[in-house]
Image (cartoon, helix red, strand yellow):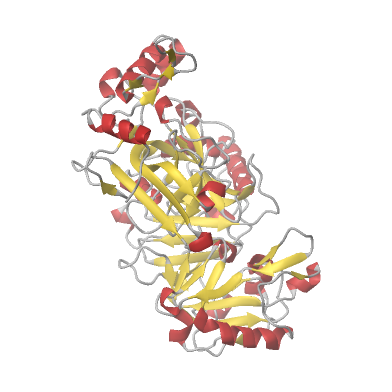
């Protein structure tokens, strides 16, 4: 049973009593009956607040321009203001920066009209719902942003059921969609409770403040790479307005979570349904910074609608996404696992190009290696978890390669010693030969990221590298590290490749073609922005040569779809 406070119950009751879907708000306080220390707050419907805000905005020239820009009038209350119509020349792919959280990566969401409010949200390929604290969330922790103030948004709506089905939760007796999510157990248990709502949102843009429609209209950016184009990607989002959080959700730096799994209700799915992006694709590109600041620390890139070749230091190769249509997870099937001797370098790129690297294959049957649920990419999980069935063989090969026992305990390493620890390689089943749009080669051994140099019998398989600089986490003491690859997952659950395993790649999740793409990358968002600005300047001067190769053309900036005409 989901418990609600008396105040929450009163507000939900008032919500369901109004056909226009209001939300109750606390108005300015007034003294009550002359009793000292007692203040009465009249409950106002959201419609009342909207009409008051509309009247205030209509009284000034600036306010009238804002209302006109968003097509907001007193008669528009009963419908959610959608994004403005997009022209055929509008960019179909959006690039947005990611920031460093406490072991995770988060995205800026800007919600509400006429002045969007920022909510930072962990990007999570393991869940569907987007959720963050709203005004009623009490004891919900201190985050990068205050709770979302739904009373300040003219476009905020509370979901009403059963006239419309709930996106994430279940309909209570008062006609409100309630959502409850639980993660983990015991000391690691985390949870949140929310009610469903809708508001206008865009992702990315400026970290320090909202952008206006004029900012986007004046941006010359056909590829959607500049932050000023972010409002062009506005759409109506259904999300969870959190009223309670526990565990990690109370402690995390980001305010909430943005769900990116395969369900249509996910963030990318709602973008696609609103025709903001043309392809059911997005990509994540992670790096790890030494510190996470409340003011925001750049730590990667997310691309909605495809992948951006400007980020790629190697051609993108493709593994087959397994369980397509029968699972919400992003899974791959591995044929083999290796440990590379002497590290091979500081990142994934050197692993792919190092022809002298010696690898040691684990003696595991394919069924044992994959378990029942194979390997799942979960960006919302900080660490990597392999199944129990891999533990003994992994430890045996580790001992042969390093001459020491494998442990998750903290140990001291110099930088040189750290880089000589084994790199973990997964050899994955490819999608249609492994090679996509960005590279053409007759010999798969010439393609970085394919397995031709380690498995001549299956040269088109995809190699995925997890170097020691990614799975080893430095502790509070300088030079002391602990491995964040664990072997405590039941074989029936499959293995989880968390955000530490995903670093150093631009990873494309392509639902259209049932594939997952990998390209080595430094995930430098600012470098892409500078290149886009340089291209814009060249084009303005009459030049037509992109600043980073032909792959940066407008056509090349979208990853291939099996049937592009369906978009």
Q: Which residue sits at x=42%, y=56%?
A: 182
User: Which x, y percent locates residue 109?
Assistant: 48, 40
Kindly identify the residue that appears in the image at 49 percent across and 52 percent down: 123
Nearer to me, 324 or 117: 117
Nearest the viewer among 437 and 253 is 253
Residue 544 found in image quarter: top right
Residue 368: x %, y % from top left: 46, 85
Q: Is residue 84 visible?
A: no
Is 51 displayed left or right of 480 in the figure? left
Q: Give residue 453's position: percent from left, percent from top.
A: 59, 83
- Note whether 436 is above or below 274 in the view shown: below
Residue 143, relative to residue 434: is it above or below? above
In the drawing, does residue 378 fall left or right of residue 514?
Answer: right
In the rendered view, tell whether residue 119 sits above or below residue 452.
above
Which residue is nearer to you in this view: 532 or 334?
334
The residue that appears at 37% across and 32% down in the rendered structure is: 7
Considering every residue shown, the one lying at the far left of the view is 163
């Amino acid at each position: 049973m989901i418990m609600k406070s008396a105040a929450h119950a009163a507000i939900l009751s008032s919500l369901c009593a109004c056909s226009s879907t209001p939300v109750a708000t606390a108005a300015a306080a007034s003294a009550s009956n002359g009793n000292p220390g007692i203040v009465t707050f009249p409950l106002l419907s959201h419609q009342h607040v909207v009409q008051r805000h509309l009247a205030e905005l209509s009284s000034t020239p600036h306010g009238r321009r804002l209302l006109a820009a968003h097509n907001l009038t007193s008669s528009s209350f009963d419908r959610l203001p959608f994004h403005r119509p997009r022209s055929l020349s509008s960019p179909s792919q959006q690039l947005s920066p990611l920031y460093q959280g406490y072991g995770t990566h988060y995205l800026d969401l800007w919600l509400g009209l006429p002045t969007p409010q920022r909510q930072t949200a962990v990007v999570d390929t393991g869940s569907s719902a987007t959720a963050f604290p709203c005004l009623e969330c009490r004891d919900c922790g201190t985050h990068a942003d205050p709770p979302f103030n739904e009373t300040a948004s003219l476009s905020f709506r509370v979901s009403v059921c059963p006239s419309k089905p709930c996106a994430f939760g279940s309909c209570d007796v008062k006609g409100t969609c309630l959502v409850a999510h639980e993660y983990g157990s015991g000391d690691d248990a985390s949870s949140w409770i929310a009610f469903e709502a809708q508001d206008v949102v865009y992702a990315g843009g400026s970290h320090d403040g909202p952008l206006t429609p004029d900012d986007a209209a004046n941006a010359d950016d056909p590829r959607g790479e500049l932050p000023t184009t972010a409002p062009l990607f506005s759409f109506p989002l259904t999300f969870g307005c959190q009223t309670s959080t526990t565990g990690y959700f109370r402690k995390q730096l980001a305010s909430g979570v943005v769900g990116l799994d395969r369900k249509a209700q996910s963030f990318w799915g709602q973008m696609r349904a609103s025709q903001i992006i043309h392809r059911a694709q997005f990509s994540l590109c992670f790096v790890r910074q030494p510190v996470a600041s409340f003011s925001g620390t750049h730590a990667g890139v997310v691309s909605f609608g495809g992948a951006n070749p400007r980020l790629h230091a190697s051609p993108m190769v493709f593994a087959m996404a397994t369980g397509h249509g029968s699972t919400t997870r992003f899974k791959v099937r591995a044929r083999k696992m290796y440990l590379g001797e002497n590290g091979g370098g500081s990142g994934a790129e050197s692993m792919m190009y190092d022809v002298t690297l010696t690898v040691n294959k684990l003696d595991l049957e394919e069924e044992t290696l994959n378990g029942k649920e194979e390997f799942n990419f979960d960006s919302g999980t900080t660490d990597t978890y392999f199944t129990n069935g891999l533990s003994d063989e992994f430890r045996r090969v580790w001992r042969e390669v390093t001459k020491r026992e494998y442990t998750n305990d903290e140990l001291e390493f110099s930088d040189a010693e750290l880089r000589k620890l084994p790199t973990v390689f997964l050899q994955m089943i490819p999608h249609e030969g492994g090679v996509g749009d960005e590279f053409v080669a007759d010999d798969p051994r010439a393609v970085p990221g394919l397995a031709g140099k380690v498995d001549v019998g299956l040269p088109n398989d995809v190699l995925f590298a997890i170097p020691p600089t990614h799975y080893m986490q430095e502790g509070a003491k300088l030079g002391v590290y602990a491995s964040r690859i664990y072997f405590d997952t039941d074989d029936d659950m499959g293995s989880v490749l968390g955000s530490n395993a995903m670093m150093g790649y631009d990873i494309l999740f392509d639902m259209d073609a049932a594939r997952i793409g990998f390209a080595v990358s430094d995930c430098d968002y600012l470098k892409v922005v500078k290149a886009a600005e340089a291209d814009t300047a060249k084009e303005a001067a009459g030049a037509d040569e992109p600043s980073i190769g032909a792959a940066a053309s407008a056509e090349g900036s979208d990853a291939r779809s099996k049937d592009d005409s369906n978009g």
